[in-house]
Amino acid sequence: AAPTTPNARRRGGGGGGGGGLFGTPRGTAASPGGTLAGGVVGGDDDDEGAIASILRRSTRRPPHLTSGAGGGLSASSLLHEGAMPFRATSAATYETRAAAERKKKAAAAAEGGEPGLSSEAAEEDMVLTNRKERARLFTRLLSPSVTGAARGSVPPSRGSNVVVSLTADDAAAGCPKMRRALLLLGTYYSLFVVLVLPPREGSAGGADHDKDEDELVRGLRDGLRGGGDELPKEVLPDHRVVAVRSVTGRVAFVRQLSRPEFVLDCDPEIREQLGRFGFTVLLYSAPAAAEGGSSALGGALLP
């Protein structure tokens, strides 16, 4: 009879031909020491060692990881509660790199006799412009009308997790102010964007429906970015733009994150639901139908 120890059961009962997670593949003989003839290790400790070996050889890296960091286990070691910390992402140095690139272009233009800012002025101009715009954005974002508090609040520390919700119509509006607001937030905080899709009609499902929904979300992500330079992927990578259809989904997404400092939403029910768990929810005015390339978020933060 086959052994009945827990380890034997996990490995498929010792001779069942792949009945368990670590079962012997069909047509592969097991050697006396527990090592498969094909080179696959059967023991628990050996399995863990094989997995660790594979991970060590991996060079995969998150798309938003800073260029100086390695991939594989090196990148995994940076994770904090499942998310890459802001300091390790390309968004943290985006403004500095963009300003340096602008300085380089200004210097090249000056050498060619083209009029324009000096290289130093070009670099300083971009940094100061972003700083001033971000200060105005924080003033609007943390005003009593948005926070619901009796007086204004202090902005969270740089690098904190924040969540911004957008309706599908708002995201598709192609509003430059909205993209600018998200860029200013995404280069200061670890930004997560939730696209709120309309409720699903009927009981449609299946592969075709999933494909249509994937295309919808992909189109909204592309619309959110514009040409790419306005809100580049290194500031807001695709995997940090998620789509949900219900209040329950939005609440669940926020709760699984590593304690965001605030959630920016337009639905009072989100404030009520997340407030029960101690989250700070800032409310901007619910969007009307997006017209003329304008959005509620852009109008609320950068009027």
Image (cartoon, rainbow, N blue to C red):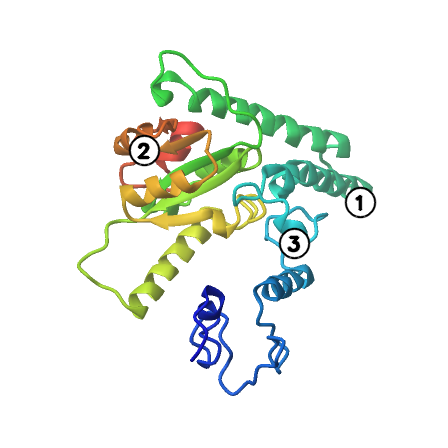
Mark nearer the N terminus (1 vs 3): 3
Which dot marks residue 112? 1
Q: Secondary structure at mark 1?
A: loop
Can you give x and y, in whole percent of width and height, for residue 31 in the image? 61, 81
- Per the model, the C-alpha gap separating discs 1 and 2 is 49 Å
Among all residues in the image, which is located at the extreme top?
Answer: 150
On screen, 78 above or below 71? Answer: above
The residue that appears at 53% across and 31% down in the rendered structure is 160
- Per the model, the C-alpha gap separating discs 1 and 3 is 47 Å
The residue that appears at 59% across and 53% down in the rendered structure is 63
Which of the two residues, 199 or 104, is positioned nearer the viewer here? 199
Mark nearer the N terminus (1 vs 2): 1
Q: Are marks 3 and 2 in contact (CB under 8 Å)?
A: no
Look at discs 1 and 2 and give the one toward the viewer: 2
Give the position of the N terminus as an image quadrant.
bottom left
Look at discs 1 and 3 and give the one toward the viewer: 3
Which of the two residues, 223 or 155, is positioned nearer the viewer here? 155
On the image, which quarter does residue 4 sit in?
A: bottom left
Give the position of the C terminus as an image quadrant.
top left
Q: Is residue 74 left or right of residue 170?
A: right
Look at discs 3 and 2 and give the one toward the viewer: 3
- Per the model, the C-alpha gap separating discs 3 and 2 is 39 Å
Which of the two residues, 75 or 225, is positioned nearer the viewer here? 75
* Crowdedness near tag 1: few (<14), some (14–19) or many (≥20) residues, C-alpha within 10 Å: few
> Which residue, given by chain and number where applicable, does mark 3 sit on?
73
